[in-house]
Amino acid sequence: MIGAFGKLMPPQWRSLAFGAGTAAGLFGQFLFSPLAVALIDRYGWQHTLVIFAAIVVLIVPLSLALAAPRDAGAAAAATAPPQQSMAHALTEALGHRSYWLLMLGFFTCGFQIFFIAVHLPAYLIDRGLPAEIGGWTLGVVGLFNIVGAIAAGWLSALMPKRYLLSLIYIARAVAILAYS
């Protein structure tokens, strides 16, 4: 979605648009984490899953707003790069140090996010707090991630993205180690 969103923006606005687009997605974490706990408490997890599935189905038509106009798609196809086989693309990617660093970054980010999302609510329950506190805690994390995403979008226009991501991942790792 972010890639499609970026294509709609002029180049000078793309970095901030990526941050704003990411922030919009993070609003879902802020909204749906506490909502999920409330719905599970009231209706059970099975009905909550059906409610969330219905919400996702309602979101699908919104994706049409990100579709490229037909004439822009034809122009892009006329200047499309030559085709490359999957094996050649993988061989080329695996041979680049940048690819390995990018994958390490994605792994680090995913591990940190899922570690917190999975273990924090259970940890709070183990400490005697109600499940609602876990939902609201994840919601507040999402709220602060909104601020961080917009700031990262703005900063990525001012400095190389690889340095910015490295700083973010190192800061997350230090924070997790501090609370371990």
Image (cartoon, rainbow, N blue to C red):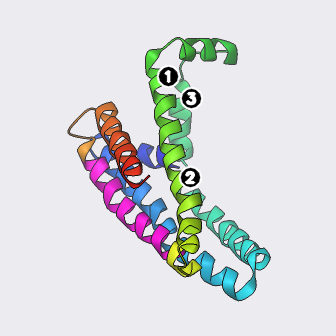
Residue topped by disc 2: 114
Q: Earlier in the sequence, mark 2 or mark 3?
A: 3
Residue 37, picture quadrant = bottom right
Say above or below: 145 vs 3: below
Q: Earlier in the sequence, mark 3 or mark 1?
A: 3
Residue topped by disc 1: 100
Residue appearing at x 57%, y 44% in the figure: 70
Q: Name the one closer to the observer, 145 or 120.
A: 120
Q: Earlier in the sequence, mark 2 or mark 1?
A: 1
Q: Is residue 91 left or right of residue 6?
A: right
Marks 2 and 1, how far apart in space? 21 Å
Q: Nearer the viewer, mark 3 or mark 1?
A: 1
Looking at the rendered structure, the kind of residue marked 1 is Trp
Residue appearing at x 49%, y 67% in the figure: 138
Looking at the rendered structure, the kind of residue marked 2 is Phe
Q: Position of residue 89 (x, y in %)?
A: 61, 16
Disc 2 crowd, CA 10 A, few/some/many (<14, 14-19, 20+)? few
Residue appearing at x 48%, y 60% in the figure: 25
Furthest residue toward bottom: 42
